[in-house]
């Protein structure tokens, strides 16, 4: 059971949920970057890397027996926050295409750099499977 909670007393949630209540088996998903199966960071900028990183996260989740709708929390680490904000509509479209419209609780955090020098975003998550 997963319940997404967005109180009317808070600003409208767009692309995330203010809170998520869930019961079941918890799966902790390691941070995923825009790394392809060969171990290289994909070229093409923040939207392309976001798509690869989210796809990697979903692949790990599916390997654990889950689906995108089971995501309850994601943290997105962002090297270039202004570029990420500028691409927000495209990034939102990528999320909807890969993960649907069941948005988890989320945080976006600006960072100086990530482990892989060419990585622009890293996404980690928590899911709860029924």
Image (cartoon, rainbow, N blue to C red):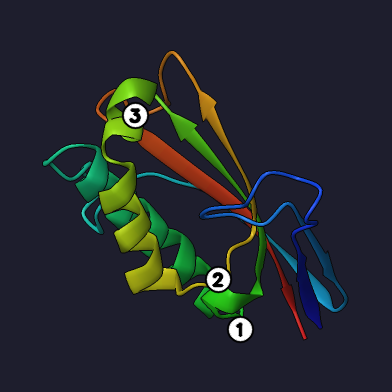
Q: Which mark is residue 61?
A: 2
Q: Nearer the viewer, residue 14 or 70?
A: 14
In the rendered image, which quarter contains the C terminus?
Answer: bottom right
Q: CA distance from mark 2 to mark 1?
A: 7 Å
- Find numbered disc 1 in the image and state the secondary structure of the residue it sits on: loop
Residue 54: image x %, image y %? 40, 58
Q: Nearer the viewer, mark 2 or mark 3?
A: 2
Q: Looking at this view, name the residue that lies furthest to the left.
A: 44
Q: CA distance from mark 2 to mark 3?
A: 22 Å
Q: Looking at this view, name the residue that lies furthest to the top.
A: 112
Residue 2: image x %, image y %? 77, 77
In the rendered image, which quarter contains the N terminus?
Answer: bottom right
- Find numbered disc 2 in the image and state the secondary structure of the residue it sits on: helix
- Find numbered disc 3 in the image and state the secondary structure of the residue it sits on: loop
Compared with 5, 123 (above or below) is above
Q: Which mark is residue 33?
A: none
Q: Which mark is residue 116?
A: 3
Compared with 94, 32 (above or below) is above
Residue underneath mark 1: 65
**Which is nearer the N-term, disc 2 or disc 3?**
2
Image point (61%, 54%), residue name? 125
Tell me if I can see residue 120 in this picture: no
Q: Nearer the viewer, residue 115 or 43?
A: 43
Image point (68%, 44%), residue name? 11
Rate crowding at label 2 as few (under 14), some (14 to 19) or many (20 or more) other CA atoms within 10 Å.
many
Rate crowding at label 3 as few (under 14), some (14 to 19) or many (20 or more) other CA atoms within 10 Å.
some
Q: Nearer the viewer, residue 107 or 114?
A: 107
Side of 44 where 89 appears, left or right? right
Residue 35: image x %, image y %? 29, 48
Tell me if I can see residue 41 in this picture: yes
Residue 89: image x %, image y %? 30, 49
């Amino acid at each position: 059971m997963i319940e997404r909670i967005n109180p009317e007393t808070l600003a409208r949630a767009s692309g995330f949920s203010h809170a998520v209540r869930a019961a079941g088996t918890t799966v902790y998903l390691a941070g995923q970057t825009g790394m392809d199966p060969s171990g290289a960071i994909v070229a093409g900028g923040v939207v392309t890397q976001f798509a690869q990183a989210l796809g990697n996260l979903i692949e790990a989740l599916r390997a654990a027996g889950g689906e995108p709708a089971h995501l309850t929390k994601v943290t997105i680490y962002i090297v270039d926050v202004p570029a990420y904000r500028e691409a927000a509509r495209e990034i939102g479209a990528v999320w909807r295409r890969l993960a649907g419209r069941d948005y988890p609780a989320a945080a976006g955090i600006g960072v100086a750099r990530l482990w892989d020098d060419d990585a622009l975003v890293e996404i980690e998550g928590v899911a709860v499977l029924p």
